[in-house]
Each structure stands twice: as C-alpha cells, then as structure tokens.
Image (cartoon, rainbow, N blue to C red):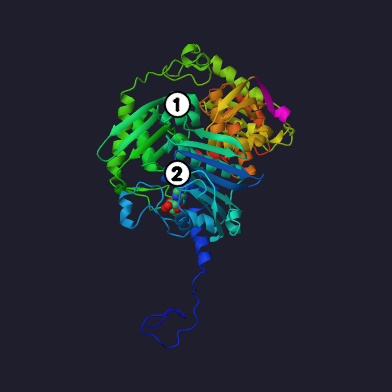
Amino acid sequence: MPSRRGCGRKVRGMTADEGTPTIHLLDPSEAMKIAAGEVVERPASVVKELVENSLDAGSKRIRVEVNSSPRQITRISVTDDGIGMNRADARLAFLPHATSKIRTLSDLGNTLSLGFRGEALASIAAVSQVTLVTRCRGEGCGNATRVQARGGEIVNLSEAGAPQGTTVVVEDLFYNTPARQKFLKSLQAELAQLTGALEALAIAHPSVVFQFFHNGRERLATGRGPDLLEAITDLYGNEVAGDLIPLSADHPLVRISGYISTPFSPRKTPSRVLVSINGRPVFSRQILRAIRRGYGTLLPSHTYPVAFLDLLMDPSRVDVNVHPTKRHVRIGKEHEILAIIEEAVRECLRSEDLTPPVQESGAARTSPGTVPAPAHGPAAGIPADFAPVREPSPVSAKMTDMRLRQTELPTGISSVETLVPEMEVVGQIGGTYILARTRGDDLILIDQHAAHERVLYDQVTEKRDARRVSQELLVPVVIRESPREAALLRGITGLLGDRGFIVEEFGKESFLVRGIPSVLGRMDDASAIHDLLGDIFSEEVDTPEDTGERISRSIACKGAIKAGTICTREQCERLVAQLRLTKSPYTCPHGRPTMVSFSKSALDALFKRT
Ligand code: ADP
Ligand code: MG
C-alpha cells in the first residue's frame, strides 16, 4: 500500500528507511500546560476547584480571599478546616492523576465527591505558583506541611505550624501561558464570574460557612444557619427569600429538595435558577425547561422563575465525566427525571394559594380598568365592533406626552441638514406604526418604538455631561443585588454615571440609585430600575465599550414609547420631527429599520397603473 506522506512512525516489521519524523513528543511540562487549559480556564475555575477540594475534605468553614491590582487578580487563597493531608499526600497531591477519591473508573459509579480526576492541583500548579499548607486531623499543631510549587515543579517542602485543615494560595496565575493571560476578560468580569461560582457552591452546600473577601472587604457570607433558606437570604436578600415556596419530592429515581418562587415576580433571565445534582452545581437547559414547564401558563413567556433545587440521585446515573469542568453532566433516564422535576414543580404550585398579592398604590395609575374608555360613537360606515384606533386614553396620552417631552431637547442638528424628507402624518396603525406621506406623495411607515429608541439613544450618547443627562431622584432608591451582580455593578458605575445613572455602593450588596437618565422621565420605583439593570447584567460584561454601548441601548429601549401605545396625531408629528433630527434616522440602535417607504410610483406599480 503506498504511503500518503513521509510517515516516520515505527510500525512493527518495517525496518527500511523510514524518513525523518515530523511528529515528536511534547516536553511533559508543555503537555501539562496544555492539559491545564482544560481545567483552569480563568481565575474562577481555580476558585471552583479549590473550594470543591475543601468540600470533599469535609470542611465546615471555607474562606476565600482574592487580591487584585487595578487590572487583574494577583492572588487567590482558599482556607478550609477539612481533614487535611499528611506530608506524603501533600507531595503526591501535585502529581497529575493523583487522587484519594477513586481507585478505578468503576468507583466513579458510587462516588459522591466533587473531584476524582486528580487533575486540579497539578493543573493549577502547572500554570502558577502554589503554596499549600496542610495539617491533617490528629496531627500536632507544629506538624503541618508546607509545599511550594511553581510551573508544575515542587520547589520547596518544609515543616510548618498551622491549624487543622488546608490553605492553598495561588499566585502568578498564567505567568507561563501568556496566551491564556491575554484572553482573560476585564477584572470586573473575572470577579463576577468567580463570585457567581462561589454563589452556586454556597447554595449547593448551605450548611457550610462560606466567606469571600476581595482586597480585604467581605463580599459574600453564608452559613449563619444550617438551612438553605438562610443561605438564600444571605445571598439574595429578604425580598427573594420571601417569595419562595419549599419544594420536596421523593421518587425512587431522584429526591428533589429546595425552593421555587411564586409566579408573581418573574425574571427576564434564568440567573436565579440554581440547580445542583448531588451537591454539584450544574447547568442544564433541559432541567431549566422542565422547571418552566412545571409553571405552565402561570409564567409569562420569555420569563423565568427563581429556583434553588438540589437533586439527589444514584451517582451511577450521573456521568460527570463529560466536561472538563463538570458543569455539564449527562443523566441516565433523563426523560423520566425531567418529567419528575416538572411534576414536582407543578404539584408544589398547586398546593399553594396563588392569589396574586394586592398591588401597591402605584398600580392604580396605569391600570386600564380605572380609566373610562373615550367616548367614541361609531362613525358612519365603520362597523361598531371596530376598536377606536385614534384616541389614546387620557392617562396613556399623558404618559406619551411626558416621554416625548423628555426627548424634545436640541441635538445640534438643524432640520435643514436632515436626510429625512418632510412629511405629514396621516395616522397610526395598531398603536405601532405611524403612517405618513411626503410632499411627493410617497407613503412612509414608521415603527414608533424603533424611532423613539433612536432619538433617545442619540440623546444618551451625545450628552456626556452627567449633570445634563441625569435627573436626581427626590428619594434615592435602594437596590439589592446578588454578590455576583454586585461585583458586576461595581465595575460599571462609571459607565452608568456617564449615561445618567448615579449609583453608589451602600453596604455589601446594596446600592443607592441617586439619579437616573433624564430621558427616562419619572421612573422612580425600584422594580423598574432593577429591571433595567437586569437587562444590562444579562450578558457577561466584556469590554467597557461594549458595556457602555449596551447601557445606552437599554436606556433607549426602556425610555422609548412602546409598540401598542396609541398616540394622537400631534404626538406622532412630534416623534417624526424628533427622528428627523437624529444622526442616523433610518435605523434604531439595534440596527432594525425605523421606517420603510413606498414611493408613489411603487404604489402605482402595485395597482398595475404603469
Ligand atoms: P481530585 O480532587 O480530583 O482528587 P485534585 O488535584 O483536586 O484532585 O486533588 C488531589 C488530591 O489532593 C485529592 O484527591 C485530595 O486527596 C488532596 N486534596 C486536595 N485539596 C485538599 C484539601 N483542601 N483538603 C484535603 N485534601 C486535599
Ligand atoms: Mg479536586
């Protein structure tokens, strides 16, 4: 058989000239650095692996400390009060595939430990400097061991004094893998990721005391009491915890326990659906879907409940060995298990009194029931069952007026320079599209929301003088965020401020909103502000440019007149006039068209008049 290329591999039986090999074996330390990339992607993975080791060691208290320079994380340390290691184990722990947790792959079927591959410490040590100090249960106080490793090599091993348990300190992370270093996100994004990982582990292990400090300041603390509800309160506040219903379901295949929310305060993202399987935080779209299905029609579409659930199942049914970080798992009998989850959620909601709580005073303002429908007799020729299309309700008209007034600020472009032709508004369709005609009798259709969004966006981005874009709230609004969201928010207060959102830190996870963009008009209730920030958090914070851009777009979207809002002709005219003064009047900030036009000749062609 002719060889395809100069292959230099040794195959038994061939001895003739084999050519020069192009394949060579990697230096073990290089190979280890590559393998490490799978487990240790970023600082958050280091924290996750170290905390998992602490949990596996039966710890009751875990303390995580992170230090950073203005740009990057410089030091991570995890201290536990677990079983510790003797000197021999402390040395072995750094070798690849060194684990105390399984002997053969078949043991995996009955292990409940979070680790088992013996890769984490070796991988972390391959790409950083690690100092491990450990003392095992029963050893005297001065009999602890200190191991120092750098770039995968143990550089120092000595006796030490230490309390029982283990401390692992990681410094110079990725010092020898510059490519990895380069791909790290902003400091705030890394901190948020890391805090999120800790949040998930703390929820999955509510009886363990977790503490997290960043540059000496406490950023997360759980474990005041042994139960999950206390951990939830610690992390997400009373408001979230107060809206929860306990769920527990016993089935031979799976035991489910935890809390789910009432359907009354749905969220736009699934960020507060935290699921763990046998104490391991996992992410599964299928489980998320099953939970939502359990709510059925109680939840508006595109919204999510809050849920904290732990699934206890036979470890032989969970294959955690499908992903390097074990965040995704494969479940045996998945269909049955998903059906059980769905039914458990449904049953839990059925047993609750789900009468909606009485709305607070503010609701009456916009409730359609309290506003008399405009008197609108059927005009000749229009069937009586046609809904009135022109007249907005007085309340809605006032709201629209207010929104338009907010954007009636000069933009510096005079109407002479504008690209958009003058037009006369003919009417509005479906409370969504404005119908207009030009002098030349072209027909123009304008998407009112997209158009107003463009107007708002230009105002938010062009006026960078905070005093002009912001309006001070009479009473500052206090908002409570989760530790992860708080980390994100801390990183973007400057960007928010440039755009009119004046946000200050106020305790560990709370923030004070002192001012909001003036284009948002009178939006002073916490839930609206929270909603807007939720939009901004929903994607991972990346570069400041991207984030700033997203903030501007969210503000524009929230402040703009909604589709479905009936406007008077005068209001439509004001909106068109504002749109004509924008820099790119033809698209909204998301790139969708604000208007489409049909020339007179195109209309003629449609009716075969040519
Ligand atoms: P794995 O967790 O998959 O076993 P690791 O590389 O994370 O692999 O850890 C290697 C071994 O080191 C563990 O199996 C355990 O015996 C020991 N070890 C690591 N961290 C700790 C700790 N915090 N307390 C006690 N033992 C630990
Ligand atoms: Mg481990």
**CA distance separating discs 1 and 2:** 30 Å
Q: Is mark 2 within 8 Å of ligand 1?
A: yes
Could you tell me residue 71's position as x and y percent?
65, 46
Residue topped by disc 1: 241
Q: Nearer the viewer, residue 596 or 490?
A: 490
Q: Nearer the viewer, residue 236 or 462?
A: 236
Q: Which mark is residue 82?
A: 2
Range of magenta residues: 466-474
Q: Nearer the viewer, residue 333 or 430?
A: 333
- Please give left or right for residue 14 compared with residue 576 in the image: left
Quadrant hosting residue 310: top left
Give neighbour class at mark 2: few <14, some 14-19, many 20+ (Cα, 10 Å).
Answer: many
- Name the secondary structure under disc 2: loop
Could you tell me residue 565's position as x and y percent?
53, 24
Q: Residue at x 45, y 26 (%)?
A: 241
Tell me if I can see residue 588 in this picture. Answer: no
1 or 2: tag closer to the N-terminus? 2
Could you tell me residue 68's position as x and y percent?
63, 44
Q: Residue at x 52, y 26 (%)?
A: 431
Q: Amino acid at mark 1?
A: Ala
Could you tell me residue 592's position as x and y percent?
56, 40
Q: Amino acid at mark 2?
A: Gly
- Name the secondary structure under disc 1: helix
